Image (tube, rainbow, N blue to C red):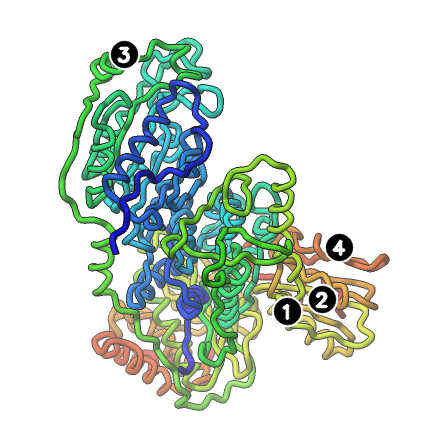
Amino acid sequence: MSVAPLESYMRKTDALPFCPGCGHERVLKDLDKALVRLQLDPKQVVIVTDIGCIGLSDQYFATNGFHGLHGRSLTYATGIKLARPELTVIVLMGDGGCGIGGAHLLNAARRNLDLTLIVANNFNYGMTGGQHSVTTPLGGRTATTPGGNAEGPIDLCAAAAAAGASWAYRGMTHDADLAERIEQAIRHPGFALLDVWELCTAYYTPRNEMNKREFMNLLTSSGMRSGLLVEKRGAEFGASYREWSKSVTPPQPILLKQMFASSLDRQIGIVIAGSAGQKVKSAATMLARAGVISGLDATQKDDYPITVMTGHSLSEINLSPTPIEYTAIDDPDYFVVISEEGLKKTKKWIGRLSEACVLYGDESLSIPGTRARVRRLPLAKLSKEAGKLSLSTAAVAAIVADGKFIEPQALEQSVTSFQSPKVAQANLKAIRAGLAALGQPASA
Amino acid sequence: MGLEFIEGNEAIARAAVKAGCRFFAGYPITPASTILGNMLELLPPVGGIAVQAEDEIAAIGFCIGASMAGRKAMTATSGPGISLYSENIGLAIMGETPLVIVDVQRQGPATGSATKGADGDIQFARWVTSGGLPIIALCPATVAEAYELTYRAFNLAETYRTPVFVMSNKEVSMTCEVVDLDSIELPPVANRPRPLEGADYSPHQFRRLEEVPPVVDIGDGHATRYTTSTHNKAGYLTADPEVIEEMVEHYAAKIESVADEIALYREDLQEGAETLVVSYGVTSRAANVAVHHARAKGRCVSSLVLQTLYPVPQRILRRAMQGVRRVVVPEMNLGQYRYEIERLAPPGVVVSGVNRMDTTLIAPAEIEHRGQLS
């Protein structure tokens, strides 16, 4: 069945709403001509606009329309195009949108998703009273530059090109071939920008001399060029994303089955205070998992500075034979300090510890006065026996041997079942060193 | 599946995928970043798309576009990002766009403490955008609930064509707990309502104000329209006060009319209790311990734990407050949800808060003593 070609993609409604002489009408009509040449299914075309007089445009087309927030049209267009790559997505922005949405413009150019952006550039904000925009020429008089614009204009095409745009064109509404250029832009398989200079007869032309000749003068004075300025092939983002993501595989869940018993009859809190690089977090997770495979409930949270490779590293673990409600540890049962940084971070806390707590550390650390029972943990010896990276694991093994709240075998299982063979081997050695580390009873 | 030891953010990401989420865009921010990290790994293998945007405004913009083009979408951030989402959340309300927004709350205001927990965004979620129209907000207390409520958030977003907040907290999102995700009971996956075949289509068609308009996604056979500006049912700009009024009443009615129907909560009321504790989120866990402790001492105390914060489950709150003399509301903020309870409390009932906003959890003993539970 042959279908009669569409003669227009515009709705047969009232006249367009633009001021007499405004360039927007020409932009819309040339966009319509381009769509007629392309003969796309209107239901597969999306026209996305944002705020400004040009933002009124989408509702005059019989395609899909989306009218969004000022300067954000490229973001909706990106979501639509990623969700449905088969759609043709055309964005209409004003020069105002290029200011407030400048980051989106640069990133759309960089990303090279297959979108077409037409900037209806009339050098000022027409909708709000003729204020200056990022494209207002130097010296231009606007509602907000009564003495003339002291800021230079941005060269949208050069900026987009610098960001990596694969297609950029600068033209004027006077150009006879604007419709063809728009068609070319839509056909381009990547991000395409048309910076179309036009007149704002309501605000800009009454205050400034602006016409075809002045456009040419402006090109010269601003050092900008017109015509097709960039045309190159680049990897289209959507296609690249789909290709590259084929190699992404989700991590396999680590399942924990009960294999050991625990004699623990109440919730206990364990704190490990060390430094970045001491694998405190991993040792804490090893302990928590050992608890879970011993039939206990467990929680873990960690604290470290934003600069993750320096400073303290603190982990808090709760173990309990019944479901854990409150996850903070206000009154720890076991407190292990394995580095000066860990000590510094927890000094105030150590000062508040009760007699019920056992604090593990050694004489290399100047542990402040505390009511906790202090046990000597030979850190240097452990570090040497276990390997520097496994000191936390050895320390955890030491308190398991001392506290007896889970079987030492549960720790070994936690290492062999859930860690890579290489890491597990080192940690098994550390566990053995830790289990043997404490020879004397806690001193009051 | 079996027991796992995972953090709340991983549970949120896995729930999203289970609920049918196939688009995620986010911007890195502690303590929400690991949701982005998880989604980047979980979505591609199921044909989904997960991207990091140039900023939060772009992240939610991508999601809104993708949702309107038919993909179930989610974004996740923390308080500073919610500030940047604000205007677009208004657009999502106007466009009746299904969207799940995870707010992993951290200590504010402004940059605050990036890695410390808080519940400081509770009223912020409700009044997040200009115009003051209602949204739905759920609040998990545990990793298991983070999973369940994120899944339910998608069903609610789709069913009611609205943004739905999951109000997590660093203390839930970045705490590892033991869960068996398969043992969590979930309703069937819900999808956005669709029009009857052959029917005339408008993106915002409704007869009764509370009716949720069926939707055809962009690219699915109708040229459709969305706009951030006041519009009629067909999505065309209007300045007609009668049309504007009808649309605004519709946006409100479709959410407020189902407040009690969609409310999720745990009620543990005791006959003759003089005190009721109303709590939510991670603080409800300390409240549970406090209530349990007070009861062990022979005191009669009722407890209501809310998982749905907005729309406010008014009937449920009123019922729970019947006959009590005091209501205690512990919160990790200076007292935000307490306002909702104060306005619903029967005359003579004293509503008081136990508040802490110093990044630490409120302890059970603090609720028990400052709340005078025993």
* Amino acid identity at mark 3: Glu
- Say the numbered circle drawn on residue A83: none
- Say the numbered circle drawn on residue B265: 1
**Would you say the residues marked 4 and 2 are in contact, meaning their CB atoms lie under 8 Å apart?**
no
Secondary structure under tag 1 reads: strand
**Would you say the residues marked 3 and 2 are in contact, meaning their CB atoms lie under 8 Å apart?**
no
Residue identified by numbered label 4: B342
Alpha carbon of mark 1 to alpha carbon of mark 4: how far? 19 Å
* Amino acid identity at mark 4: Glu
Secondary structure under tag 2 reads: helix
**Would you say the residues marked 1 and 2 are in contact, meaning their CB atoms lie under 8 Å apart?**
yes
**For residue A308, which quarter of the picture?**
bottom left
Tell me, yes or no, if residue B102 can be seen here: no
Q: Pick whichever, A345 or A153, lies toward us.
A: A153
- Mark closer to the chain start, 1 or 4: 1
Instruction: Identify the residue at horizontal 86%, vertical 58% (top origin).
Output: B348
Residue identified by numbered label 2: B316
- Mark closer to the chain start, 1 or 2: 1
Alpha carbon of mark 1 to alpha carbon of mark 2: how far? 9 Å
